[in-house]
Image: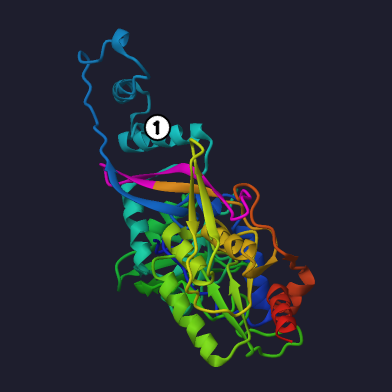
Amino acid sequence: MTADLPATSPSYDSEPDPQGSNSTALRNTLLGVIGILIGVMLIAVGFLGRAITEDDEVAAVAAPTVTADSSPDPVLQSGPDFLVLDEILQILESDFVEPDLVDPEYLHGAAIRGIFDALDDPHSTYIDPQTYAMSREGFSGVFQGIGATVEKPAGSDYIVIVRPLPDTPAARAGLLSGDQILAVDGEDAAGWTLDEGVLRIRGPQGTPVELLIRHPDGVEELITIVRDEIHSVSVSTQPLLQQTLTDSAGNEVTDIGYVYIAQITRRTPDELTQIVNELEDRGVTGLIIDVRLNPGGLLAETTEIADMFLDQGPIVIQVDRDGNEQVWSSSPGQITYLPIVIIQDEFSASGSELLAAALQENGRATVIGVDSFGKGTVNNVRELSNGGAVYVSIARWLTPDRNQIEGRGVKPDIVVEFTMDDIDQGRDVQAERAIDFLRDIAN
């Protein structure tokens, strides 16, 4: 989630940290990210952890008023009486020994969260109006804030910087991957949810925000950042973990094309098409598509991207609650016939998994890395009358070969894992293996 969020994602952070060329920066990036992006954090908040379908239909919710003598006759109730919640609130407001704790808005939200907690589905959730409005902004790729991706590690009291976006106030101020945000404008940030932190950090262009930061080396620093308009690009030719793409011998690579997809937004297909066309004009002999740390995005754009590289074959299969299936199939007209390698990691989720599986199982790409995250649930967005929304799991995804993604992920064709020696030496061994693979094909 970006501190300016929107995720996908939430909005969308785009490009990688440009300071990854030396071993210290690479160590900070890898160790910081690995320590941050664990488990359901990729899917807990916002749009980015999801391949979502959008629903323009607004679910109108009437909020009945309740008085002491207007309670419905329990004999006439055919199901649970949710009006009892209002009665309980009235009793707490009049009788509870610590009245300051009886915050109707907070308790209302807690009751809603309790409903979704009972479903035991991390992909179905309620989004309050403020967060939902902020999330929708992210689909345009333009928002106002400092320009940094943040997450809330499991078990941590503080929100952490995943990475600053290039050429943004956050990057220019010296924020680093793994930085903990201890306070915002003098307010202790301990215990804040991810949403609370994002709402306090982002703000109108031209306004300052003061952050107390604890860097990965333990040094604390007070940093004032002036917010700006952030243009988030979802596709980049900047390598994720290095300043320049290099092979195992340390030589700069010019014969292989490289694109990093940070997330899948409405702009991603156009951005990707332009970059791939430029790489073809340059005469590259193969293409690396890097989806590491990519938590997904929009379904329509995900299938559009897959179709860009396919002439035929299924892209993804959706199976709903009644067992009905819907198949998205590719059509002739791919943008390139270059050999493709997809690099993924354990944080590649949702839409990025659909993309990898579609190209892999149609024989269009070889997947290198480790097992992906395993988020194969279809989420529908239903807007509510209060301006908020609910994400509801409505179906499961299957790959073209009918493999389940949920809880399993996409299996790489070639497993390549990082070691501490790789990190110490500043080597991106997954990218190096992809380069060697594509060069072997070309030869």
Say if 338 sits above or below 209 in the image: below
Q: Is residue 443 left or right of residue 121?
A: right
Say if 133 sits above or below 216 in the image: above
Going 47% across and 42% down the picture, which residue do you hit?
393
Say if 181 sits above or below 249 in the image: above
Going 56% across and 57% down the picture, which residue do you hit?
349
Circle 1 Cα neighbour tier, 10 Å, few/some/many (<14 / 14–19 / ≥20): few
Work out which residue is located at the far right of the displayed protein and give it: 421
Q: Pick the residue in front: 201 or 183.
A: 201
Query: Does the rendering let one see residue 54?
Result: yes
Q: Pick the residue in front: 251 or 196.
A: 251
Place of residue 49 in the rendered image (x, y in percent of width and height, measured from the top left): 50, 55
Chain part drawn in magenta: 381-404
Q: Pick the residue in front: 64 or 254.
A: 254
Place of residue 20 in the rendered image (x, y in percent of width and height, measured from the top left): 61, 79
Q: Is mark 1 on a helix, strand or loop?
A: helix
Place of residue 372 in the rendered image (x, y in percent of width and height, measured from the top left): 64, 58
Which quadrant holds residue 147? bottom left
Which quadrant holds residue 399? bottom right
Query: Does the rendering let one see residue 165?
Result: no
Say whether residue 341 is magenta. Answer: no
Q: In this view, does 76 lie to the left or right of 42?
A: left
The quarter of the rendered structure image containing the C terminus is bottom right
Q: Pick the residue in front: 428 or 29.
A: 428
Say whether residue 386 is magenta. Answer: yes
Read off the residue under disc 1: 111
